[in-house]
Amino acid sequence: MKEIPKAYDQSKEPELYKLWESSGYFNPDNLEGKPYTIIMPPLNANAPPHVGHALGLTLEDIMIRYHRMKGDKTLWLPGTDHAGFETQVVFEKKLEKEGRSRFQMTREEFYKEVWDFVQHNKHITEEGIRRLGASADWSRNTFTLDPKIVEIVYDTFKQMYEDGLVYKGERISNWCVKHQTNLADLETKYEERTDPLYYIKYGPFVLATVRPETKFGDTALAVNPKDARYKKYVGQEIEATGLLGKFKLKVIADEAVDPDFGTGVVKVTPAHDAADYDIWQRHKDEIPGPKPVIDSRGKMDLPGTKYHGLKVAEARKVVAEDLQKAGLMEKIDENYKHNVQVCYKCGNIIEPLIMPQWYVAMTKKIQDPKSKIQSSLRDMAVEAVQSGQIKIMPERFEKVYMHWMENIRDWPISRKTWWGIPIPVWYKGDEIKISEKSPGEGWEQDPDTFDTWFSSGQWPYATLRAHGKKDFEAFYPTRVMETGWDILFFWVARMIMFGLYKTSKVPFETVYLHGLVRDKDKQKMSKSKGNVVDPLGVIDQYGVDALRMALTVGNLPGNDLPLSEDKVRGYRNFANKIWNASRFVLQNTEDLESNSPQPPLKLRGGDRTPVRSGALLPEDQKILDELDQVVEKITKQLDNYDLAHAAEDLYHYFWHTFADKIIEESKSKLANPETKKSAQIMLRAVLETNLKLLHPFMPFVTEAIWQINHKDLLMIQKWPNK
């Protein structure tokens, strides 16, 4: 009897991966069939993959391995992201620990150090992707700062500039004082805070505000036009006494004012509040423009006053105390709950400031009649989903997508960061040129860099074009974009816009959104809570396949997934069950290949183990007929991207039907010379079919078993229903 190790040795997984990679079958150039393409969402090149990455990589690898076995020309293009702002935040934390700051370095010195840091960590990131079993084509591995990618990004920017879709404007932006950069709306979040609500006297009015320190930048007072209490004041100018003397403000009416907030009267401070900025935009002909009183360092900018140079929080206290002393404070509500906008990375409160930035016009239609595009970016992206060219899974996210598109604002794409792709704009007096390199002496480059989502938003067509016209024509549009639901707007919507704008085609046919991985109690994972699951650490202990199954079973699209060590341990036991059951079958069917010549073979299920006509007993034939139904069900589930149920059904079939029932009942038949042959053929057929069905989900243990009895790779075997 063939000697097969008693236990599955997960330490052999890296060797199996090298076997796959060296075979050349990760590369679609060695495959035939209809193209099936997934562009890997580029992982941040500053750290090893986290458990969220492990989830996405697992789901994508299942899709890729399944379609490769179906005979498709599969391309899974891997890549990493320079992740501008995020990487700079990580690196600046490193500098802080070393007692250094980027502001003590030249821009060139800082960039060089971050580049070296990223190149080192990029290899760690890529090795982590390999450890998770990702059967990606590493010959096409791409980095968002590769010269060809940068060239394509610049070309897109130039075309959009010429089409009037990018412009530079001074508008209110979300400013992070700590990181000294502006952020898009999507890069901020809101937290509920309890703060004092100050009721301040303004001439004949009392109004409520949480920010008394910005009163020096007020340009008007506003009420709701339907508020009968203040109708007589609308359009009039009131005089009031303030901390710096008397002042006058006009009263305007605007629908944005909530009559139930405070007293129904609000101060308008367009330089330091986004809503007030919008009010000013609507009433430019009635009231003065913005009056900035806070600088980019988060300090009061009021030269000649006692408040000049105070940090905002400190100034708030001082101003409130002075208002009380002057008799200008009506009352203070100490327990006012409200939502505060904060930086999504550091959690510091956002300071709305007016800054010059580059914007992408989201709702503006291209005016040039020569352009192929006669629609806005937003409208193209809406039409692609409404028409069914792109399907979003789960379907409920289509409504979320449409709602966001309906309320979309122009997108600020410039950042004050030093790490990233420089904006290719040069200035000389009033002249502007779009150029990757300096146009000559006297020209100064725009100091900002692109928001990383501007470059990664071009990822599907940029990666393929970077590898040549042949790749682009063969593999674009791609089939699936698999990613987390939390970046539907950050990334997916923008890829749709850019893809349609640059290629006139959708970048992918299906958007598969996975949920967030949470701990066993469904709590968000965080280092401070100590509940973070390290996927590479889990792999070392339980093996890749156990983690992959734990991340797949019960993971419906769009739903958050609780993950515990117990769940991973349970699927490690399943991997062992597969090994033990397979070991039994292989040892008890060892003489199947060495039998004397038999009658002609009748193939069942395509390339499944051949069944000799008349060689099977009715009960064994029934098992194979039932297996056909399992194959059909799993195939249908995978075609519909129902990965969670496919994995769960395979688990139950293998463990409870095949191992617990079929194998146990076969033992007596194997001992009987009259029924042995039929039992052997049936067992081998069921085993090899199951190995193929399980391979996309658990590639390592299934390939390890396949290699015991075969010289070719399980990875490229035909799917059983062919």
Image: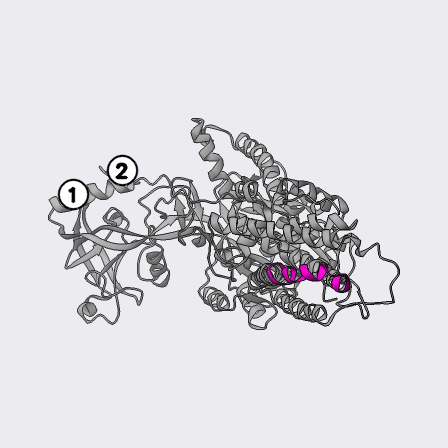
Find numbered disc 1 in the image and state the secondary structure of the residue it sits on.
helix
Residue 633 got which mark? none
Is residue 674 part of the magenta span, yes or no? yes
Q: Residues within 10 Å of mark 2 (few under 14, many from 20)?
A: some
Q: Which residue is at the front of the view, 119 or 429?
A: 119
- Earlier sequence position, callout 1 versus callout 2: 2
The kind of residue tagged 2 is His
Distance in Å between CA atoms under marks 1 and 2: 16 Å
Give, as a single range, the part of the protein colored magenta. Answer: 659-677
Q: Which corner quadrant of the image does residue 252 belong to?
A: bottom left
Q: Which residue is at the front of the view, 353 or 498?
A: 498
| Residue that mark 2 sits on | 308
| Mark 1 or 2: the one toward you | 1
Residue 578 image position (x, y, % from top left): 63, 53
Residue 641 image position (x, y, % from top left): 60, 64
- Tag count in the figure? 2
Find numbered disc 2 in the image and state the secondary structure of the residue it sits on.
loop
* In this picture, residue 206 sits left or right of residue 635: left
Residue 354 image position (x, y, % from top left): 39, 49
Q: Quadrant of the C terminus?
A: bottom right
Residue 85 image position (x, y, % from top left): 49, 43
Considering only vertical position in the picture, is 582 above or below 373? Answer: above
The residue lying at 69 percent from left, 69 percent from top is 628
| Residue that mark 1 sits on | 321
